[in-house]
Image: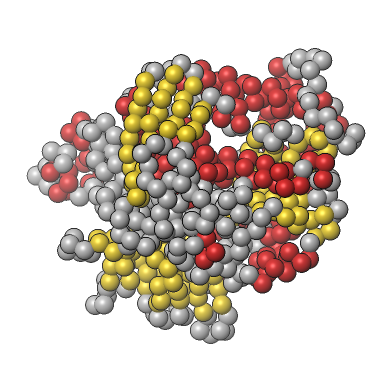
Amino acid sequence: MSQKPDQKKNIDTVTFEVLRSAYEHTADRMSTVLQRTSFSPIIYDMVDFSNAIFTPDVNLVGQTANCPVHLAAMHFSAEASLDEFGKDELGADDIVLLNDPYNGGTHINDVTWTQPIYDESDELLGFGVSRGHWTDLGGGGPGGQSWGTHLAEEGLRIPPTKIVEDGEINEALLGVLKSNTRVPQYIEGDVQAHRAALTAAKDELHRLERKYGAGTVRQGMHDVLDYTEERTREAIRKIPDGEYSAQDYGDCDGITKDSIYLDVTLIVDDDEITVDFEGTDDAVPGSVNSPKANTYSAVYYALKFFTDPEAPANAGMYRPIDIELPDGSWVNPNWPRPVIGCTTFAASKICAVIWQALADAIPDKIVAPTYSECNWFTVQQEDPETDAGYVWSDLPPGGWGGTPTGDGMETTADPLGNCMDLPVERAELLFPVTVEEREFITDSGGDGEHRGGLGLRETFRFHGYAELSVETSRTKEGSPGVNDGHSGGLGRLIKNHGMDDEEVIGGWKKDGDEWEMCLIGSEPFQPGESFTIETQGGGGWGDPTDRDPDAVREDVHNGMVSPETAADVYDVNVESE
């Protein structure tokens, strides 16, 4: 089975650009189809999915702007699918499904679908790959958020398995999926949505084949990867050679209150970067370990911001980057270490520590870390009027870090996801909950010449009995600033905020003397009780005393910064003016 590009002729510049855009358009159309046909709110509203096409040699060549932390990890999923079945065993109407964190996956909720695409001569033209975060696949807590000590507590683990064979759905596997979830009503609809997305990929590549020929389509893939590699190497050459190190941490693992440390050294040598995690803590008992696929993906998207972000996003970028992971570490654990928080908790810290290391290399270009979290929570809830059961999730955003040219964005999804938080109207329409407040938190952005973005306070009141599982971080110390910028505001989790029985259930209590773990599994809420999340601010960029006084006055006027902070930190006395 030949998979080589047609090397007999060079592709002209116009054709190259058309093909490059077409590969990205193919992934974009896949995402449009998936979002419009899925049944799960976390997919169609919160956009927690990704789609891409791969070359016959399983290199990512076209992706859409979905979850960056998914995209490089999908390479491992496609490879695992082919290792299990082999290219010769996969027909044009076969689809392989998996979610195994230790065999091509990340965390169990991210289900990946891989389908080969053949040309009219029955030669491999590429692969369509679709990944979606499924709301619930069992486990000890809603959404798999049990925060236990074994992978089995996080839900149904699926090795590479044919979900579709010769065009026929695997009814036995479908039955297993529906029997191991709290929301079986979503499963069949999401299955068909992923199939439709893969059909869109096949249709688009066949359209290109009819217009340009299969050999040219494959050659274009080859050339686009080389083009991105060349641009990435040129960008790396602009970073001064040297070794740059930094350390960051996660607040806890849900089992103990101990912080988990992450060490990284970036070794820049001409047009290549080595990312070495030597010194990082060993894998922890709790559920925030990061399997290899997740760690690789986090490294790539962290570096993409500063290695020609305008270059086509594909596997050509990976070639000049070498990643060294200590075996058995927090960023490269072994089975059966639990991993449910890998994409949201661990990946964001990997990105943040790389940005901090780069601050020593390119201080005039670096951006301060974002709030570096996803604040992912999942609710299992009963409707008191109908006795119906629900499981739903949200991702309340926080602030981004200050930049060399301006302030960080307020309450925006972390770059690991490109996801959306659940719209208030949708939450109240579909589930027995009322969203009572949603507002910026004054002074939560890290102070700096360019201030970090503000965090968010949001309160949910449950109409029926509910169990809440939640993951957050940056509750011990705020997201760090760079170039003398200050840290962003802390996150907190509160039950019955503003009531006589108010209780901080995650983060520092009001007196600042006691800290509660920020990973919580199945916390009970009685009907009428509320849950408030205070999200984190982004880090500041530069010395706060260098900030334009007029910008400080405007921040005070808009409620972003308090008069006290303006006077104490920025040396601007607004009240006396």
Q: Is residue 434 left or right of residue 200?
A: left
* Residue 206 figure quarter: top right
Instruction: Name which residue lies at 57% across and 84% down.
Output: 386
Tell which residue pokes out farthest to the right in this image: 121
How are the residues colored?
secondary structure
The image shows a total of numbered marks equal to: 0
Q: Determine if residue 72 is in view.
A: yes
Give x and y (percent) for residue 222: 70, 24
Residue 60, image x, y percentages = 65, 35
Q: Which of these two is toward me, 381 or 116?
A: 116
The part of the image, by quadrant, that contains residue 62 is top right
- For the residue pair 106 and 281, the one nearer the viewer reads as 281
Please state if 260 lies on the left or on the right of 41 as rendered.
Answer: left
Q: For the C terminus, which image quadrant? A: top left
- Above or below, 168 against 274 in this view is below
* x, y percent for residue 92: 84, 45
Q: As rendered, which of 530 and 576 lies closer to the eye?
A: 530
The residue lying at 66 percent from left, 33 percent from top is: 59
For residue 292, side relative to residue 132 (left or right): left
At x 30% / y 56%, what residue is drawn?
Answer: 258
The outermost residue toward the left is 576
Residue at 28% x, 38% y is: 481
Q: Is residue 416 visible?
A: no
Residue 27 vertical placement versus 397 (above, below): above
Which percent across, then down, holds residue 385? 53, 85
Q: Above or below — where is 359 with respect to 142? A: above
